[in-house]
């Protein structure tokens, strides 16, 4: 098992490698990071531009730039120079990772729980009013642009706050800049309050897709012979559903969840934008706008590692769900 | 990670249709081609047919509407911040732009981009997956690992990075998003081609001296047609969501041109004061994505009846 995990981690290295090269090339060809500086009026002294070019290693050939970045990252944990000279990419990523990760993790968890429940209920009561309602909602949520729904939620939160004269929903930022009650409990409450709406906004679309998926998987299992056998031998229906059917029907969902993580990280970029969170998404968008190559590669590395970890967890989940799968 | 992806079989994924044998001519019923049968099955899917009608109406509105409507999207009318009325069915914004004209223009750009995404992704995906599945070996590994790579990176990040230079023109956005969706189609096509290339009819074609290109294009790809058409339809839905999201974060269609995503982005601060500017573009996105998804469902049932469970 451990050997398998280690082997998988090593196997993912080429993907990390390839994706950083790809992004490096895209950013390099997308334009000059010093364009803003060069176009400044009055023009800066040529020495400043040269210094900046040297600091950003723009004076070196392309492969040398990439090699230096890789070497410093592996040997010193240095993510390379940012266009913003006072920003340390590594530290910045670390802070923002916590913010984004709690949004993504909680969204995934809540979306999964609701998806499994509605998927199973829909499958068991196929073609009932409940099934049709869930199906209708599922299709509707799938068709809804996430940013539109997020803005809608945000303005509903604001409207509710105004109507009740309270601060029930926080609609801006990932936490309050100043807290009256600065205890641990006060902080947790504040962070949780800021998380409610963004979590719903981010989780909703995954929920819609996953619940449809869970319904299909559950239907397939419910029509299978071994479930019929379990029923025929007189097991209580709850036991048949949960122990026999659901366990098998969770396997496809595990795969899909792991595959959707990349999309969820992309969705987080948009959710963070709507709710003005200072997370990885904001970091990505400012790096792209500033053509900050090393910052983008840092972002990519972090998100690729998240995707890889999720896939590994999914693989390990298979062996929990399906006793036939054993990793040696 | 790659091997999970390669081996995952999703319940919704259509299976390839196998070539049916020669039609039996002894029956007295009228002979129908495969295409006619598919059309009949599609027409029986009422929701899909209704969706197709609505979708065609939306497309007509997007392309014919701007020619007939009295304002263009750049016109500035003397009425600003008007709620919807007879003169301005979708209201006006704070500068006096007519909301209906703007939504029509946004609709046109977004529909154009979404259709092109589907076209680019399926064309590229067919070639990509066809070569990969037919030649196997090294070409297959390289092409599929590259597909994995593209799919590991959140598409919005790549699209935004690419769009920050070429963005602004609708066809550039369509090319970028289409290219990023191509691996999905490629993977599906590869699956079909891999299973078909071992069959006798391919062997027969090869024995007759058909070239590889001919085998791929005339014998293998047509069999993957059902898969590709369903994917292409669903890509229109995901394409419009992707394009509007990209325009919303500022890396898609730029002002002075407009798209549904950009309109929403501009209206987001005015949801409470001028809600009409926010709701109408959103409703159109939902309507397009919803109808296209239903059409895709209907097509899947029509082109690949073995996939359909119970509903006949």
Image (spheres, rainbow, N blue to C red):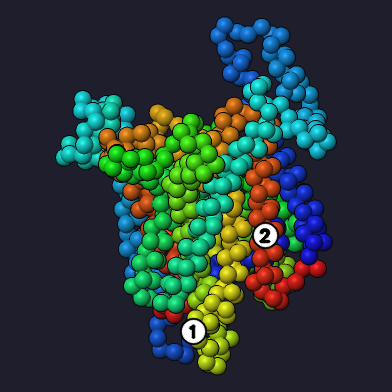
From the viewer's perspective, tell me whether residue A236 is left or right of residue A310.
left
Give the distance between the C-alpha atoms of the residues marked 1 and 2, in whole angstroms. 30 Å
Q: Is residue A56 above or below residue B286?
A: above
> Which residue reaches farthest bottom?
A233
> Which residue reaches farthest left?
B86
Q: Which mark is residue B47?
A: none
Splitting the image into 4 quarters, where does residue B265 fall? top left
Please tell me which residue is depicted at 48% across the width and 64% down the height of the picture.
A115
Please tell me which residue is depicted at 41% across the width and 73% down the height of the picture.
B41
The answer to whether any part of residue A106 appears in the image is yes
Residue A1, x across and y down, in percent: 78, 65
Badge 2 local density, few (<14 within 10 Å), some, or many (20+)? some
Q: Quadrant of the N terminus of chain B?
A: bottom right
In the picture of the structure, the residue carrying the numbered disc 1 is A237
Residues at marks 1 and 2 touching, judged by CB atoms closer than 8 Å: no
Please tell me which residue is depicted at 44% across the width and 36% down the height of the picture.
A172
Q: Nearer the viewer, mark 1 or mark 2?
A: 1
Relative depth, front residue between A117 and B297? A117
Relative depth, front residue between A94 and B312? A94
Badge 1 local density, few (<14 within 10 Å), some, or many (20+)? few
In the picture of the structure, the residue carrying the numbered disc 2 is A313
Q: Is residue A6 above or below residue A317?
A: above
Identify the chain of the residue marked 2, using the numbered disc in the image. Answer: A
Mark 2: secondary structure: helix
From the viewer's perspective, tell me whether residue B141 is left or right of residue B225.
right
Identify the chain of the residue marked 1, using the numbered disc in the image. Answer: A
């Amino acid at each position: 098992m451990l050997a398998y995990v280690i082997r998988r981690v090593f196997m993912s290295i080429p993907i990390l490698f390839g994706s950083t090269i790809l992004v490096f090339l895209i950013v390099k060809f997308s334009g000059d990071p010093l364009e803003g500086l060069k176009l400044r009026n009055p023009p800066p002294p040529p020495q400043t531009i040269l210094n900046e070019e040297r600091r950003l290693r723009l004076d070196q050939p392309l492969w040398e730039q990439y090699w230096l970045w890789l070497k410093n990252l592996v040997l010193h944990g240095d993510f390379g120079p940012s266009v913003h000279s006072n920003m340390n990419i590594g530290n910045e990523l670390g802070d923002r990772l916590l913010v984004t990760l709690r949004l993504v993790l909680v969204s995934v968890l809540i979306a999964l729980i609701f998806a499994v429940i509605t998927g199973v209920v829909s499958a068991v009561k196929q073609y009932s009013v409940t099934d049709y309602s869930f199906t209708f909602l599922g299709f509707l949520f799938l068709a809804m642009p996430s940013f539109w729904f997020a803005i809608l939620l945000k303005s509903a939160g604001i409207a509710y706050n105004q109507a009740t004269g309270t601060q029930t929903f926080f609609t801006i930022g990932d936490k309050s800049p100043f807290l009256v009650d600065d205890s641990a409990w006060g902080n947790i409450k504040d962070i949780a309050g800021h998380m409610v709406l963004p979590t719903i906004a981010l989780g909703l679309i995954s929920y819609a897709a996953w619940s449809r998926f869970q319904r299909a998987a559950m239907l397939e299992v419910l029509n299978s012979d071994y479930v019929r056998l379990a029923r025929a031998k007189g097991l209580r229906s709850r036991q048949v559903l949960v122990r026999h059917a659901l366990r098998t029907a969770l396997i496809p969902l595990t795969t899909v969840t792991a595959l959707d993580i990349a999309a969820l990280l992309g969705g987080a970029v948009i959710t963070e934008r709507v709710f003005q969170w200072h997370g990885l998404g904001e970091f990505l968008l400012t790096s792209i706008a500033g053509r900050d190559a090393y910052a983008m590669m840092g972002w990519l590395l972090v998100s690729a590692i998240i995707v890889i970890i999720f896939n590994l967890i999914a693989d390990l989940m298979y062996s929990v769900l399906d006793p036939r799968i054993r990793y040696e | 990670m790659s091997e999970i992806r390669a081996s995952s079989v999703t319940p919704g994924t259509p299976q390839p249709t196998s070539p049916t044998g020669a039609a039996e001519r002894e029956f007295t019923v009228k002979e129908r081609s495969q295409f006619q049968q598919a059309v009949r099955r599609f027409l029986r899917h009422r929701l899909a047919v209704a969706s197709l009608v609505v979708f065609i109406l939306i497309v007509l509105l997007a392309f014919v509407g701007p020619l007939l409507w009295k304002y263009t999207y750049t016109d500035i009318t003397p009425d600003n911040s008007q709620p919807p009325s007879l003169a301005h069915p979708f209201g006006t914004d704070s500068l006096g732009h007519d909301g209906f004209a703007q939504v029509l223009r946004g609709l046109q750009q977004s529909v154009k981009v979404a259709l092109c995404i589907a076209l680019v992704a399926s064309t590229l995906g067919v070639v990509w997956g066809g070569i990969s599945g037919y030649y196997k070996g090294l070409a297959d590994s390289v092409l599929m690992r590259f597909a994995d790579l593209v799919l590991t990176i959140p598409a919005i990040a790549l699209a935004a990075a690419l769009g920050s230079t070429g963005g602004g023109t609708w066809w550039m956005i369509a090319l970028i998003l289409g290219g990023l969706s191509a691996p999905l189609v490629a993977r599906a096509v590869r699956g079909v081609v891999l299973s078909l290339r071992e069959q006798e009819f391919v062997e027969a074609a090869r024995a007759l001296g058909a070239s590889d290109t001919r085998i791929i294009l005339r014998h293998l790809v047509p069999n993957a047609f059902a898969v590709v058409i369903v994917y292409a339809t669903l890509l229109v839905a995901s394409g419009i969501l992707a394009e509007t999201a990209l325009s919303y974060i500022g890396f898609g269609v730029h002002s002075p041109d407009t798209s549904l995503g950009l309109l929403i982005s501009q209206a987001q601060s005015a949801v409470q004061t001028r809600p009409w500017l926010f709701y109408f573009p959103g409703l159109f996105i939902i309507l397009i994505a919803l109808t296209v998804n239903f059409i895709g469902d209907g097509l899947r049932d029509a082109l690949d009846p073995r996939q359909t469970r119970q509903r006949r």
